[in-house]
Image: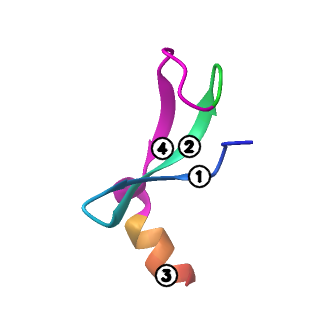
Amino acid sequence: GDSGGPLTYDNEIVGIVSWVVIPCGSSYPDVFTRVYDYVSWIKKHM
């Protein structure tokens, strides 16, 4: 599915797909997790 997929802006990942109502271009909004909130955790573990 789409969960875990990237949301990018200007070639940077700014979000990760959390869940979608209907995948692949529907008119329903998708829900993303903001990557910035986890940058320190990501840097520590990668």
CA distance for labels 2 and 1: 5 Å
| Amino acid type shown at disc 3 | Lys
Q: Is the Cβ of the residue at disc 2 closer than 8 Å to that at disc 1?
A: yes
Q: Quadrant of residue 14?
A: bottom left
Which one is closest to the eye, mark 3 or mark 2? 2
Determine whether, in the image, residue 31 is placed left or right of residue 36: right
Does dot 3 land on a helix, a strand or a loop? Answer: helix
| Amino acid type shown at disc 1 | Gly
**Start and end of the magenta stretch?**
24-38
Q: Which residue is mark 1?
A: 5
CA distance for labels 2 and 4: 6 Å
Residue 33: in magenta span = yes
Q: Which residue is mark 3?
A: 44
| Residue ranking furthest to the top | 27
Sequence order check: which comes first, mark 3 or mark 2?
A: 2
| Residue ranking furthest to the front | 25
Which one is closest to the eye, mark 3 or mark 4? 4
